[in-house]
Image (tube, rainbow, N blue to C red):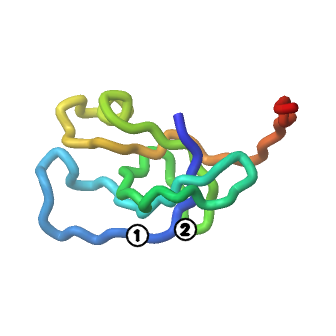
Amino acid sequence: MEMGIVAGRVTATRKDDNLVGTKLLITQPIDLNGAPLNAQPIITVDTVGAGIGEKVIFVRGSMASRSMSNKDSPVDAAIVGIIDSLEYEDLKG
């Protein structure tokens, strides 16, 4: 699983039948401090009702398609959680 912040929304009036009714969001991967990683933003399918500006948990690859009710959906990245809070201790050094 990875963390990201929802940066925008994608509207696609024509898409695969298995994606009809899904919400597509632009998600920027972030580090534990909430800073954007040097990765390009990706398009994710929202499975939990996330909104722009929210920190989220997302998965990629086969795990993403498993999060869909139709396992045949052509999904490569999916938001599976909204982060309410995050606590961690940096154990380096």
Using the rendered view, name the quadrant where residue 66 is placed: top left
Vertical position of residue 88 compared to residue 38: above or below: above
Tell me the SS state at disc 1.
Answer: strand
Using the rendered view, name the quadrant where residue 87 is placed: top right
Tell me the SS state at disc 2.
Answer: loop
Q: Residue at x 87, y 32 (%)?
A: 93
Residue 16 located left or right of residue 38: left
Q: Residue at x 17, y 32 (%)?
A: 72
Vertical position of residue 92 compared to residue 78: above or below: above
- Which x, y percent locates residue 84? 73, 48
Distance of mark 1 from mark 2, alpha carbons? 8 Å
Residue 42 located left or right of residue 5: left
- Return the residue at label 1: 9
Q: Amino acid at mark 2?
A: Ile
Q: Residue at x 20, y 39 (%)?
A: 73
- Return the residue at label 2: 52
- Which x, y percent locates residue 32? 71, 46
